[in-house]
Image (cartoon, coloured by chain):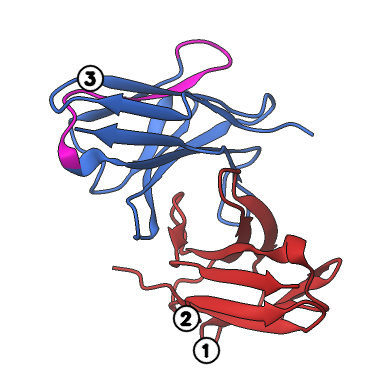
Chain colours: A red, B blue
Amino acid sequence: ILNVEQSPQSLHVQEGDSTNFTCSFPSSNFYALHWYRWETAKSPEALFVMTLNGDEKKKGRISATLNTKEGYSYLYIKGSQPEDSATYLCAFSGGADGLTFGKGTHLIIQP
Amino acid sequence: EPEVTQTPSHQVTQMGQEVILRCVPISNHLYFYWYRQILGQKVEFLVSFYNNEISEKSEIFDDQFSVERPDGSNFTLKIRSTKLEDSAMYFCASSEFGGEGSEQYFGPGTRLTVT
């Protein structure tokens, strides 16, 4: 059974502050790591797909890093805004079609 | 921007009844998936579908479940005889390419409640 863990489970951040959270995954049989942003009642939105050790990806104020050797990825949000409030999911791909998800980090930005 | 759509948004059914959940994937996508999330738990993979056949399925996807692409646009998940434990949010996803690095685009989900 593949174990994908995310921490923290929930996070309250003041508007304007920067924040980050973690996804840990198996370091063997790694193919890709996906990050999704999921707002209630909407579709999970794909943020990044990362495949190479040392990869860094950026989309506006959000960026992610990947360490496949130790099995973790960080997601960073710079200068948090209220619209960043969402659940952030990571998902591991180990060569199969299906993604294995973590439980998510629920981020709340306080004005 | 193209998106995956799902209907209905909420389905309530009685135990033992059959339900069909519908999805319209993004039009040029060739790979289709179903996932589910039981309340408070992780999103779990059910099945992937390509070229009109199942390419992979999880242990959850037993004989009670089936998938079909009845026409060029719809992709359906059927549960033959629903159980209480089938209550969950069911997500459809599609991708243009197969392979592990391919981005999967998700629909908004159908909340299934079995009473």
Tag 1 residue:
A70
Q: Which residues are magenta?
A: B70-84
Give the numbered dot on residue A58.
none
Which residue bears the numbered disc 3? B18
Q: Are marks 2 and 1 in contact (CB under 8 Å)?
A: yes
Outermost residue, right side: A60
- Quadrant (top left/top right/bottom left/bottom right) for the N terminus of chain A: bottom left
Question: Which amino acid type corresponds to the residue marked 1 in the rendered image?
Answer: Glu
Say few, some or many: other residues with alpha carbon within 10 Å of mark 1 (under 14 / 14 to 19 / 20 or more).
Answer: few
Can residue A74 be seen in the rendering of this structure?
no
Q: Is residue B21 above or below residue A65?
A: above
Is B92 placed above or below B15 here? Answer: below
Residue B50 x/y as whole percent = 49, 31
The residue depicted at 70 percent of the width and 74 percent of the height is A110
Which quarter of the rendering shows the C terminus of chain A?
bottom right
Residue B100 visible in the shown view:
yes
Residue type at mark 2 is Ser
Q: Is residue B91 left or right of residue A1?
A: right
In the rendered image, residue B71 lying in the magenta stretch gets the answer yes
Q: Is the residue under label 1 in contact with that under label 3 (CB below 8 Å)? A: no
Secondary structure of residue under mark 1? loop
Q: Which residue is mark 2?
A: A27
Q: x, y (%) of residue A40?
A: 56, 50
- Quarter of image, res B106: top right
